[in-house]
Amino acid sequence: MKWALITLLGIVLLILFSTLAVTLFVTATEKNQHLANRKLLSDKPTADNYNRKTVVIVFSRSGNTHVLANHIALRYNADVKVISAKDYPLGIPGWIRALYDARSHVASITPEQLDLQQYDTVYLGSPIWLYSPAPPIWQFAKSNTFTNKNVVLFNTYNSKFEQHFIDEFKSLVKQNGAISFSHQAINRGRMGNQLTTQDMLDVYDQNYQEVPHGS
């Protein structure tokens, strides 16, 4: 009985240690990525222009999806709008909250609504959290109208996404007026063995050479 308890305690301690190690590794990696991306994000690729017909709207914690958003904006001469979400800062508390909320479609975001009247095409970008687009981009999609807009959802992710979440997102923007929808996604790989930022952008350019035509 004594050895069984010792063994059980050892297993519990091992699980706790492993969980802590993963948490520290992931959050440290996110912070390092944020620092590396901050220089790339220091200059906005384009100033807002009332003649532009494309806008890229993005939520990003560590900056990876934001870098991709700027890249897309440069390609299509688009405006860039950044969504912030106070509940998901970098660090352990923000990461835990992100895991807890990952499948939610509700989030506190700024801005929650934007005037999209001038645009024909709206790119909506976020990371994938637990196989689904992150909650802030769901909240934005719910809170805005896309009447006569072509909507393109773009995501970066580490493992996979589940198609039924993408289909649900498509239904949401169509209900809010979108005339077409398409999805673009870049798998950056598992943390510790991920694509470099430049490789991510190169993969995007290779996979998505044409202007998207959604359904």
Image (cartoon, rainbow, N blue to C red):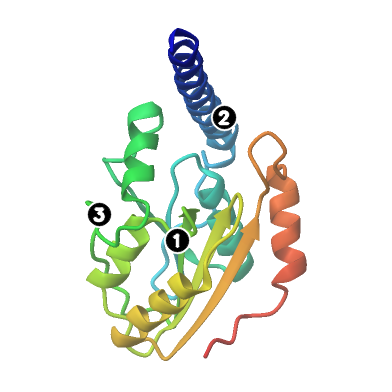
Q: Residue at the spot x=39%, y=77% of the render?
A: 168
Q: Residue at the spot x=42%, y=91% of the render?
A: 179
Nearer-N-terminus badge (3/1): 3
- Please state which of residues 17 and 7 is positioned toward the viewer in this rendering: 7
Q: Residue at the spot x=72%, y=42% of the render?
A: 196
Decide if residue 113 is on the left or right side of residue 15: left
Query: On the image, numbered disc 2 is attached to which residue?
Result: 29
Q: Tell me the amino acid under the disc marked 3.
A: Ala
Decide if residue 5 is on the left or right side of residue 14: left
Q: Residue at the spot x=24%, y=59% of the render?
A: 106
Q: Residues within 10 Å of mark 2 (few under 14, many from 20)?
A: some
Residue 176 location (% of width, % of height): 29, 83
Q: Tell me the amino acid under the disc marked 1.
A: Ser
Nearer-N-terminus badge (3/2): 2
Query: On the image, numbered disc 3 is attached to which residue?
Result: 107
The disc at residue 132 is 1
